Amino acid sequence: MSVLIIAPGLKSEWWASQLLQHAPDMDVCIWPDIGDPKSVEFALAWKPPVGALATFPNLKVVFSLGAGVDHLLGDPDFPQHAVVSRVVDPYLTSGMREYVLLHVLRAHKNQPALDQQQRDHVWDDRAHELRQADEQTIGILGLGELGRNCGETLTALGFDVAGWSRTAKEIPGITCFDDRGGLDAILGRSHILICLLPLTPETEGILNAELFSKLPKGAHLINAARGGHLVEDDLIPALDSGRLAHATLDVFRTEPLPGDHPFWDHPRITVTPHNASITDPRSVARQIVQGIACSARGDDVPNTVDVARGY
Ligand code: NDP
Ligand code: OXD
């Protein structure tokens, strides 16, 4: 039985050394340097080449090296017999919480506009209206591991927080909406809208002109989920018309973001390189070793996703 690491662009050797710390006898191989494909029963994967996982006929579990699994399920040849497990980890959650806090506070304190004042050598302490945290509603699309934690933290800071999920929830301090009917209700009140949804056929393109038109004028958008959530052509018109004040984007339809992409130079777009929160092998390798042991014993593997649902 061997364990495959198939994650072009990630530090595969580091992942291997972390696995071996917890399971010194594990037979680990790094794609494309593999022996007999039939011996591979487990794979650690991040954006594997399309079709590659289909070449391992005895694959039992694919561990996504991130919280999202769209990079796996989007492969038309993804082996349907394999169980898919994803990252749920305190460091991944705290990393996202830090990113969201940073950019919510930047929006709340008008920092992007103040940065522009500095570039223009303008000293104007009255340019922006006075507003308190409890006068700002933060809308969070997605109340899962990440969205809920961000919402609870923002509530503790005094913001008015609302969230939207597929199924109904009750979370102390957060006004919860669900299903399509609840979407308009959350949009109408969100001064800062944060997307923390998984990318599925239902959520693809959800951040579009129609959605922007339902936000309060001058809202801020933070997309830390997936580039496929945003209809890119709708964003700049929404910013230029003042419908949106600012957009902070960590994820893009094409990554790395091409050098000539208009988002780079737009004065009211903040671009970060898909690093809102990064899976830490020092924490997650141990969980994967435990997941492999569960599977080998015939027990359920933790953090598996519903492949039909897409997350
Ligand atoms: P979870 O699966 O824990 O939560 C997903 C949430 O989205 C749930 O509340 C779910 O509703 C809701 N949801 C799913 N589909 C719909 C829908 N059609 N309508 C309304 N709500 C829906 O995911 P995580 O919180 O762990 O992660 C979210 C995403 O964040 C990941 O899929 C990934 O794409 C992204 N991510 C980005 C990172 C980055 O660095 N930029 C890092 C880590 C993650 P319900 O609760 O009812 O099921
Ligand atoms: C993830 C990511 O899904 O980093 O974890 O995007």
Image (cartoon, grey):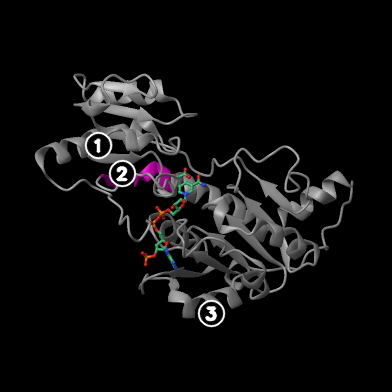
Secondary element under disc 3, as helix, strand or loop, is: helix
Residue 190 painted magenta? no
**For the residues marked 3 and 1, what is the alpha-carbon distance in whole angstroms?**
44 Å
**For the residues marked 2 and 1, what is the alpha-carbon distance in whole angstroms?**
8 Å
Secondary element under disc 2, as helix, strand or loop, is: loop
Q: Nearer the viewer, residue 41 or 213?
A: 41
Q: Given contact means CB atoms under 8 Å apart, are the residues at marks 2 and 3 in contact?
A: no
The quadrant of the picture showing ligand 1 is bottom left
Residue 59 placement: quadrant: top left
Given the image, on which type of amino acid does mark 2 rest? Answer: Pro
Q: Earlier in the sequence, mark 2 or mark 1?
A: 1
Residue 220 placement: quadrant: bottom right
> Where does the magenta region start and end?
82-93
- Can you tell which mark lies on residue 59? 1
**How far across and down, in percent of the image, does residue 93 sit?**
41, 48
Residue at (68%, 74%) from the top-left corner?
Answer: 213
